[in-house]
Image (cartoon, helix red, strand yellow):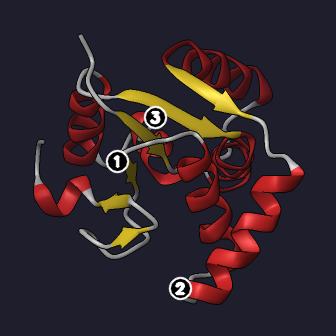
Amino acid sequence: MRGDKAFIDSNILLYLYSDSEADKKAICVDALGKYRWISSTQAINEFCNVFLRKWKRNSDEAQIAIREIRGVCKIFLLDFPTIVYAVELYSKYGFSYYDCLMLSSAIRNRCKYILTEDMQDGQIVDGLEIVNIFERGRL
C-alpha cells in the first residue's frame, strides 16, 4: 500500500514521459508506489505546455498522458482560497508566485511532501516538506 500523500510538481510528471532522462524517469516510477499522489490543474497545464510545445508531441499523445496521470494521481482544482493562501506564502517565503500556488495546493490537500526539483530540498513550508527525489535518490 502506498504511504503518505505527496504533491507532484509538473517536472516530476514530465520525467515519467521523458525519452532522454532514463535515470530520473526510473526514480519517478519508483516514487509512484511509495506515495499517494496528488497534483493540481496548474501542474497538468504546465505538463501539457512542455509536452506539446517543447517536446512537439501531438494532442492525442497529450490526452493519453493526462488520462494516465489522472489514473494514478488525484487532481486538485484550483480555487479562490488556494490563490489567497499562495499570495500569503509568497509574502512569507519569497518563492515565485507559481511555486507558492503549488505549495498552497499541497498544503490545502494535507500532503506531507511536495516532490519537485525546483525548490530547496528539505525545506519545511507551513508543515510541508519539499523533497527533491533526485538529490536524495530513491526514497
Q: Within the image, what quadrant is residue 119 found in?
A: bottom left
Frontmost of labels 2 and 3 is: 2
Give left or right: position of 110 versus 29.
right
Q: Disc 3 marks which residue? A: 17
Instruction: Residue type at mark 3: give it.
Output: Tyr
Give left or right: position of 58 versus 20.
right
Instruction: Residue type at mark 2: give it.
Output: Tyr
How far is mark 3 from mark 1, CA to CA?
A: 9 Å
Looking at the picture, how far across and down is residue 11, in whole percent? 48, 53
Tell me if residue 2 comes above or below residue 136 in the rendering.
Answer: above
Q: Disc 1 marks which residue? A: 20
Q: Disc 2 marks which residue? A: 93
Q: Looking at this view, is 110 or 119 the one in front?
A: 110
How far is mark 2 from mark 3, CA to CA?
A: 31 Å
Tell me if residue 37 comes above or below residue 25 in the rendering.
Answer: above
Q: Are marks 3 and 1 in contact (CB under 8 Å)?
A: no
